[in-house]
């Protein structure tokens, strides 16, 4: 899906391509649609190279992250947190990492708060969290009154 400030949706891009294919100048079509000429040319080039699928929104997610911390290093950070209950400022110098990187790793693994860890074991405390809303229902009842056979006062009108 397009971002909120995008001028063109997928339908608008198709309209742009159709108007240019009908012989109208790209600059005129771009002005009508409220976009710049380079943007119009970009969508036309994508349509020429990829066809209809080139007009669909692409993911802005990075395709690769070459500087990501290695999985083994992340495991060491997590192990130090669980075993010795050290914070990012203490773990960083031990492993040669900045404290901000250590904090990001701990957050990613759900270990960023010492209060979330069980003191003796160092494991994450299991909460009463459920996958679906309403999956677990808890009701506290102070007392149950004696309801006569056939219903109570609302049914009998008393």
Image (cartoon, rainbow, N blue to C red):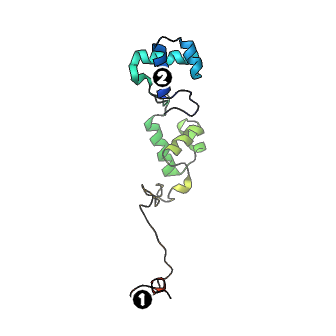
Residue 40, compared with residue 68, is above or below; it is above
Determine the image quadrant of residue 38: top right
**Rendered residue at 59%/39% (across/down):** 99
Q: Is residue 136 left or right of residue 98?
A: left
Residue pointed to by mark 1: 148
Horizontal and vertical percent position of residue 24: 51, 12
**What is the CA distance from the residue labelled 2 to the residue labelled 1?**
72 Å
Residue 123, compared with residue 77, is above or below; it is below
Horizontal and vertical percent position of residue 136: 42, 63
Determine the image quadrant of residue 91: top right
Q: Nearer the viewer, residue 46 or 99?
A: 46
Residue pointed to by mark 2: 15
Label 2 or label 1, whichever lies nearer to me, is: 2
Question: Mark 1 falls on what kind of element?
Answer: loop
Are the residues tagged 2 and 1 within 8 Å (C-beta)?
no
Q: Nearer the viewer, residue 4 or 152?
A: 152
**Rendered residue at 55%/18% (across/down):** 39
Q: Is residue 102 left or right of residue 57?
A: right
Horizontal and vertical percent position of residue 28: 57, 14
Question: Mark 2 falls on what kind of element?
Answer: helix
The disc placed on residue 61 is none
Q: Nearer the viewer, residue 4 or 113?
A: 4
**Rendered residue at 47%/71% (across/down):** 139
Horizontal and vertical percent position of residue 12: 50, 26
Mark 2 and mark 1 lie on one chain; the one further toward the N terminus is 2
């Amino acid at each position: 899906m397009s971002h909120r400030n995008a001028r063109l949706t997928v339908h608008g891009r198709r309209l742009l391509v159709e108007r240019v294919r009908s012989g109208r100048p790209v600059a005129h079509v771009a002005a009508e649609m409220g976009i710049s000429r380079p943007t119009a040319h970009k969508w036309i080039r994508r349509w020429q190279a990829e066809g209809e699928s080139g007009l669909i929104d692409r993911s802005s997610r990075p395709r690769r992250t070459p500087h990501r911390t290695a999985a083994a290093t992340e495991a060491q950070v997590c192990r130090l947190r669980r075993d010795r209950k050290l914070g990012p400022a203490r773990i960083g110098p031990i492993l040669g990492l900045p404290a901000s990187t250590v904090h990001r790793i701990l957050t990613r693994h759900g270990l960023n708060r010492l209060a979330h860890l069980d003191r003796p074991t160092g494991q994450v405390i299991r909460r009463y969290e459920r996958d679906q809303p309403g999956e677990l229902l808890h009701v506290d009842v102070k007392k149950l009154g004696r309801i006569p056979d056939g219903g109570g006062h609302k049914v009998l009108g008393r």
